[in-house]
């Protein structure tokens, strides 16, 4: 619990431009977060290990203490399969090998991040992506699909029982047309949509947009499907990731809010900025989450 309290203190100390993040820490620091009772899963986003293959990422996730894993769909499969990429074009034989690797290492695949290139241009293209997700046993797919494809995606969500987790990136001063950082705007996109359509909430990008993830989570309550849990050095666009408790973030307050919402998806440790000690960084972050239990 001492480490958890240290993270709370870091959150209370984080101040950018007169804005203090972690304002709810005082009441959340002592909250017991039992993942078994609460239902959320602790894992790693393979993007943290993107300098390695998916097979190697599975091993590193296990070594760090993760339980589940979120893939991204442009990672090479394994050292012995240099021409195979984890995406919708992966052969059944290679999917079987990936599932065997996951089972052998005791890691469950829960989600995969797709690009719009993975999604393709037609319904047949998108269907191929959902078929792949079903074969791998994923609960959801994460991305930022074009708005004119949401109706088509909703149809496939219903057909395959696969979640669509709409992702948020940071508010970009140079791209005012980009609006996916705004939780109110995103909730408008999901109005009257299937309940399996919601959000992959990225706390790092929320901080980089000069917002508080706890308030953000409250705005999108009921539509939170997964979380990319990050701390950042400062609440500014482009700010690098840091190990939990070393930046402006208040990780315990975020976890407490997820508990209040009875969130039952996965919390994935993710680093956009990979240090030379990323394995230790990921492990340290997972230890912080568990220290808050």
Image (spheres, rainbow, N blue to C red):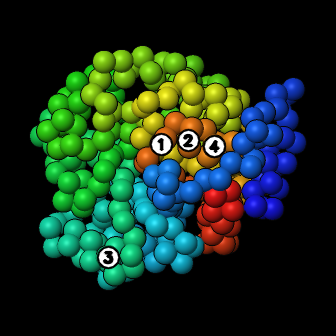
Q: Quadrant of the C terminus?
A: bottom right
> Could you tell me if residue 238 is visible in this image?
no
Q: Is residue 158 above or below residue 188?
A: below
Quadrant of residue 109 in the image? Answer: bottom left
First in residue order: circle 3 vs circle 4? 3
Numbered disc in front, either 1 or 3: 1
Q: Are marks 4 and 1 in contact (CB under 8 Å)?
A: no
Report crowding for label 2: few under 14, some 14 to 19, many 20 or more residues within 10 A (C-alpha): many
Numbered disc in front, either 3 or 2: 2
Determine whether the residue tagged by mark 3 lies in a helix, strand or loop.
helix
Q: Are marks 1 and 2 in contact (CB under 8 Å)?
A: yes
Determine whether the residue tagged by mark 4 lies in a helix, strand or loop.
helix
First in residue order: circle 3 vs circle 2? 3
Q: Is residue 193 left or right of residue 292?
A: left
Q: Which residue is mark 4?
A: 256
Q: Which residue is mark 2?
A: 258
| Residue at 21% across, 43% down | 161
Determine whether the residue tagged by mark 2 lies in a helix, strand or loop.
helix
Report crowding for label 3: few under 14, some 14 to 19, many 20 or more residues within 10 A (C-alpha): few
| Residue at 43% across, 63% down | 68
The span from disc 1 to disc 2 (Cα, nearest Å) is 5 Å
| Residue at 36% across, 66% down | 108
Q: Is residue 111 above or below residue 238?
A: below
Q: Is residue 219 above or below residue 284?
A: above
Q: Which residue is mark 1?
A: 263
Q: Is residue 194 left or right of residue 226?
A: left
Q: Which residue is mark 3?
A: 103
Q: Is residue 207 above or below residue 35?
A: above
| Residue at 44% across, 21% down | 187
Q: Are marks 2 and 4 in contact (CB under 8 Å)?
A: yes
């Amino acid at each position: 619990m001492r480490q958890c309290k240290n993270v709370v203190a870091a959150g209370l100390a984080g101040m950018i431009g007169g804005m203090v993040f972690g304002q709810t820490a005082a009441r959340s620091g002592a909250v017991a977060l039992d993942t078994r009772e609460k239902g959320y899963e602790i894992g790693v986003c393979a993007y943290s290990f993107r300098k390695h293959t998916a097979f190697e990422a599975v091993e590193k996730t296990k070594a760090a203490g993760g339980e589940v894993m979120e893939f991204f769909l442009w990672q090479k499969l394994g050292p012995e399969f240099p021409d195979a990429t984890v995406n919708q074009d992966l052969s059944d034989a290679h999917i079987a090998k990936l599932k065997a690797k996951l089972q052998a290492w005791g890691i469950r695949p829960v989600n995969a991040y797709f690009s719009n290139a993975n999604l393709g241009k037609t319904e047949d293209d998108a269907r191929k992506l959902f078929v792949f997700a079903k074969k791998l046993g994923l609960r959801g797919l994460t991305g930022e699909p074009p708005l004119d494809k949401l109706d088509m995606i909703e149809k496939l969500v219903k057909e395959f029982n696969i979640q669509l987790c709409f992702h948020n990136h940071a508010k970009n001063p140079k791209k005012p047309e980009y609006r996916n950082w705004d939780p109110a705007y995103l909730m408008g996109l999901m109005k009257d949509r299937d309940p399996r359509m919601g959000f992959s909430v990225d706390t790092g990008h929320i901080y980089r947009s000069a917002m508080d993830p706890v308030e953000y989570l409250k705005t999108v309550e009921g539509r939170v499907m997964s979380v990319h849990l990050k701390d950042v050095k400062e609440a500014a666009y482009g700010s690098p990731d840091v190990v939990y408790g070393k930046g402006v973030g208040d990780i315990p307050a975020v976890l407490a809010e997820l508990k209040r919402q009875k969130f039952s998806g996965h919390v994935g440790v993710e680093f956009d900025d990979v240090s030379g000690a990323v394995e230790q960084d990921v492990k340290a972050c997972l230890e912080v989450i568990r220290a808050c239990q």
